[in-house]
C-alpha cells in the first residue's frame, strides 16, 4: 500500500482557500511510501496448535467474528501476508477463514503450501506474480505459460482461483508500462491451457489518480492515461475488475484537521461531501468513486472497481490508531449481506467486492502501525470482534 489521498470534510472547505489547502495536503500525502510487500523477505510460518487442539480452540471461539457470506457476487475477503515469524500453519489459517465465514483470500504471491491447504476449501482465491516478474511475463509468452503451468493448472480442479493480479501498486513506476502486455500474455496462457473463469487484472493505489476532489473530477495521472486506457480495454473485453487499494486511514491521519474521524470510519449519518447530485457520508465510497469517475473519462465506465485492500491499524499512531477505530471502519465495510452490501453513490447498483487488510498481525513488518492491521493475533484470537448488527 501507498499513502492514499482522498476528499476532505466539506464542513471545512466552504471557501476557495480551504480547497487549495486540501489540494496541497493531498499532493503532500502522496510523497511518503507505505506498506510495500517485499516478497523475498517473507519467512516460513511457525506451526500453531493443530489436530484436536485446534478443533477445541475453534469450538471455544464460538463467537464468529464475521457474519455469513452474502449473495453470489458480493465478496468480502481478507488479505493474507507472511511478514511474521509466528504465524499459524496454512491448514490452521484456512480453517480460521472457514470458521469465520470469510469468502475469499488474497495472497501477494503464490505459496505452494497455502494452495495445497486451500484444496477443497471453497474459498475464492486471488494472487499474482511478484512485481519483479512482470517484465518477463510481458516480454516472454513462455514465462506466462510457465506461470500458468506452475501455479494454476495443478490446482484448478479443487482450488477456486478467481483472480490473478499482475502488479501490486506499480503505477506510476518503471514496471507500469509492462503490465498490459503481461495481462495479455497470462490471459493467452490461460486460454491455451483450457482454463476459464479467472480474471486477470492489476492493483492500483490512490496515487494513480489526480484531481480526486470531488470524486467526479478524478482522472488518471497524465503519464498513466494511455497505459490505463489499454489495460481498461483488456479488462472490459475479459469482464475483469480493476482492483484498487483504498485507505481512508492514511488520509485522516495525515490531515485530521480537515478530515473528520466520522467521515473516515463510517460513523457519519449525514453527507460530508456533496458532488453534484451525489452525496458521500464516508471517504471509502468517495475514493472508490474517484476510480469510477477516472474510468469513465477513458471510456471504460463498464469496468467494475474492486477493492484489493482496505483496513485500519490498531496501534502505533495514537489517537488515530485504535481498536475502536479499526473495528468501526471494518464494520462499515463488512455489512451483513444481500442488499446491504456496500455500494457507492456513483454505482448504486454495483456491490463493491472488498478484501480487508489483513488476516494476521505480522511482527516482521516495519514499525507498529504496519504490524497492527491484523484482525487476528498470530495465536488466532481476534484482536477485535467484527459483529454485524
Image (spheres, helix red, strand yellow):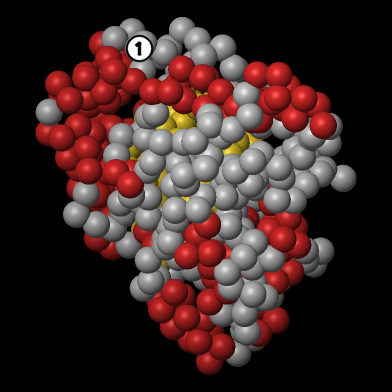
Q: Establish if 306 lies above or below 28.
A: above
Question: Is residue 47 at all visible to an observer of this figure?
Answer: yes
Q: Nearer the viewer, residue 80 or 15?
A: 80
Residue 287 at x, y = what percent?
A: 55, 59
Q: Residue furthest left?
A: 139
What residue lies at 56% left-to-right and 12% top-to-bottom?
120
Residue 260 figure quarter:
bottom right
Q: Establish if 148 lies above or below 167.
A: above
Question: Is residue 352 at all visible to an observer of this figure?
Answer: no
What residue lies at 41% left-to-right and 36% top-to-bottom?
44
Q: Nearer the viewer, residue 378 or 65?
A: 378
Residue 71 at x, y = what percent?
A: 71, 26
Q: Nearer the viewer, residue 38 or 379?
A: 379
> What SS does tag 1 mark?
loop
In the shown orientation, is residue 59 left or right of residue 21?
A: right
Q: Quadrant of the N terminus?
A: bottom left
Residue 10 figure quarter:
bottom right
**To which residue does mark 1 refer?**
153
How many numbered markers are drawn?
Answer: 1
Residue 360 at x, y = what percent?
A: 58, 45
What residue lies at 69% left-to-right and 66% top-to-bottom?
322
Amino acid at each position: 500500500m501507498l499513502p492514499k489521498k482522498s476528499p476532505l470534510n466539506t464542513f471545512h472547505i466552504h471557501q476557495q482557500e480551504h480547497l487549495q489547502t486540501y489540494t496541497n495536503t493531498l499532493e503532500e500525502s502522496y510523497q511518503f511510501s507505505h506498506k510495500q510487500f517485499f516478497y523475498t523477505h517473507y519467512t516460513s510460518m511457525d506451526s500453531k496448535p493443530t489436530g484436536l487442539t485446534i478443533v477445541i480452540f475453534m469450538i471455544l471461539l464460538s463467537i464468529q467474528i464475521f457474519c455469513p457470506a452474502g449473495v453470489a457476487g458480493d465478496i468480502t475477503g481478507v488479505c493474507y501476508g507472511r511478514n511474521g515469524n509466528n504465524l499459524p500453519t496454512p491448514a490452521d489459517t484456512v480453517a480460521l477463514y472457514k470458521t469465520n465465514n470469510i469468502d475469499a483470500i488474497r495472497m501477494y504471491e503464490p505459496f505452494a503450501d497455502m494452495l495445497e491447504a486451500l484444496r477443497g476449501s471453497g474459498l475464492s482465491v486471488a494472487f499474482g506474480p511478484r512485481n519483479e516478474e512482470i517484465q518477463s511475463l510481458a516480454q516472454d509468452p513462455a514465462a506466462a505459460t510457465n506461470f500458468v503451468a506452475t501455479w494454476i493448472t495443478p490446482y484448478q480442479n479443487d482450488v477456486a482461483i478467481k483472480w490473478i493480479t499482475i502488479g501490486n501498486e506499480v503505477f506510476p513506476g518503471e514496471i507500469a508500462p509492462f503490465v498490459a502486455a503481461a495481462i495479455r500474455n497470462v490471459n493467452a496462457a490461460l486460454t491455451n491451457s483450457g482454463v476459464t473463469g479467472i480474471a486477470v487484472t492489476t492493483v492500483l493505489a490512490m496515487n494513480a489518480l489526480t484531481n480526486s476532489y470531488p470524486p467526479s473530477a478524478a482522472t488518471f495521472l497524465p503519464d498513466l492515461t494511455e497505459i490505463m486506457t489499454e489495460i481498461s480495454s483488456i479488462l472490459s473485453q475479459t469482464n475483469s475488475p480493476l482492483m484498487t487499494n483504498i485507505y481512508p486511514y492514511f488520509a485522516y491521519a495525515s490531515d485530521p484537521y480537515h478530515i473528520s474521524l466520522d467521515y473516515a470510519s463510517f460513523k457519519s449519518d449525514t453527507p460530508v461531501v456533496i458532488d453534484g447530485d451525489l452525496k458521500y457520508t464516508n471517504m471509502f465510497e468517495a475514493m472508490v468513486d474517484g476510480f469510477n469517475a477516472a474510468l469513465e473519462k477513458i471510456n471504460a465506465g463498464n469496468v467494475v472497481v474492486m477493492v484489493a485492500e482496505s483496513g485500519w491499524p490498531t496501534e502505533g499512531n495514537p489517537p488515530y490508531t485504535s481498536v475502536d477505530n479499526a473495528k468501526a471502519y471494518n464494520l462499515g465495510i463488512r455489512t451483513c449481506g444481500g442488499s446491504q452490501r456496500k455500494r457507492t453513490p456513483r454505482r448504486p447498483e454495483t456491490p463493491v467486492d472488498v478484501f480487508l487488510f489483513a488476516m494476521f498481525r505480522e511482527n516482521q513488518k516495519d514499525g507498529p502501525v504496519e504490524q497492527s492491521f491484523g484482525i487476528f493475533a498470530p495465536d488466532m484470537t481476534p484482536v477485535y470482534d467484527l459483529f454485524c448488527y
